[in-house]
Image (tube, rainbow, N blue to C red):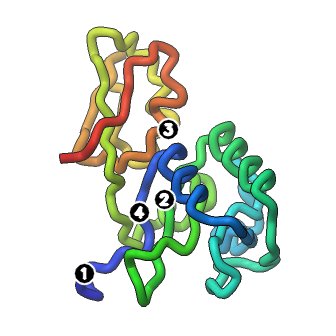
């Protein structure tokens, strides 16, 4: 991977992020730099930047070690508040994952002014349209604009799907799954 192609973050589902956590025994958290610089977040609390090492440069203040139970509480909040899991890579060893940001459309710079590039996740949504009631609930959590309503119908733009899986979590019909991106 050349430096010009390097993306520090990529998107994954909460389940994929939990698998990353299972590879570690110690955890640190700090305030999210986006939430901190904005001064607030209407969606979630400040301290959601999870790290797997204590020598990672934090994006915000308040770096401290937390227990696995506290990591689980972060995941509970991420699911409840519809936060996107965005693991971040080590800049010197891109195959090494240093932690996970939990991002939203309220305060995170990536969604408000996306100048930072972010890699697509390994998974992609698949919607069984015959089972879809076009309720639009999934469009409210699709921060990537891959799901929109038009004329009372759900319109999909799979090219824009980053693979966060938030649509799966909220679908009342259970007609959305995540499949491997080809």
Q: Whole-percent x and y of residue 131?
A: 34, 10
Q: Which residue is mark 1?
A: 1
165 relative to 126 in the view: left or right: right
Q: Which residue is mark 3?
A: 166
Q: Please state which of residues 12 and 145 is positioned toward the viewer in this rendering.
A: 12
Mark 1 nearby-residue class (10 Å; few <14, some 14–19, many ≥20):
few
Mark 4 nearby-residue class (10 Å; few <14, some 14–19, many ≥20):
many
**Camera-nearest label, 1 or 2:** 1
Residue placed at 62% from the left, 60% from the top? Answer: 107
26 relative to 170 in the view: left or right: right
Secondary structure type for disc 4: strand
Q: Quadrant of residue 179?
A: top left
Q: Whole-percent x and y of residue 45?
A: 77, 55
Residue placed at 65% from the left, 46% from the top? Answer: 78
Q: Quadrant of residue 62?
A: bottom right
Cβ–Cβ below 8 Å for labels 4 and 2?
no
Residue 111 numbered tag: 2
Q: Which residue is mark 4?
A: 10
**Camera-nearest label, 3 or 2:** 3
Q: Please state which of residues 139 and 77 is positioned toward the viewer in this rendering.
A: 77
Q: Quadrant of residue 177?
A: top left
Q: State how far apart marks 1 and 2 are (Cα).
A: 25 Å
Q: Whole-percent x and y of residue 166?
A: 49, 38
Which tag, 4 or 2, sits closer to the chain's start? 4
Secondary structure type for disc 1: loop
Residue placed at 66% from the left, 74% from the top? Answer: 33
Q: State how far apart marks 3 and 2 are (Cα).
A: 15 Å
Cβ–Cβ below 8 Å for labels 3 and 2?
no
Cβ–Cβ below 8 Å for labels 4 and 3?
no
Which tag, 4 or 3, sits closer to the chain's start? 4
Q: Please state which of residues 128 and 42 is positioned toward the viewer in this rendering.
A: 128
């Amino acid at each position: 991977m050349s430096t010009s192609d390097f993306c520090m973050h990529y998107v994954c589902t909460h389940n994929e992020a939990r698998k990353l956590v299972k590879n570690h025994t110690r955890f640190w958290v700090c305030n999210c730099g986006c939430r901190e610089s904005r001064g607030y977040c209407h969606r979630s609390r400040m301290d959601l930047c999870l790290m797997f090492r204590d020598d990672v440069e934090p994006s915000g203040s308040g770096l401290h070690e937390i227990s696995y139970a506290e990591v689980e509480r972060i995941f509970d909040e991420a699911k409840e508040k519809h936060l996107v899991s965005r693991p971040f890579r080590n800049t010197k060893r891109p195959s090494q994952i240093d932690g996970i940001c939990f991002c939203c459309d309220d305060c995170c710079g990536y969604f408000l002014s996306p100048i930072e590039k972010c890699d697509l996740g390994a998974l992609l949504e698949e919607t069984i349209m015959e089972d879809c009631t076009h309720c639009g609930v999934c469009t409210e959590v699709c921060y990537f604009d891959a799901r929109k309503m038009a004329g009372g119908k759900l319109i999909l733009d799979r090219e824009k799907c980053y693979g966060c899986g938030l649509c799966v979590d909220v679908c009342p019909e259970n007609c959305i799954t995540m499949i491997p991106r080809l």
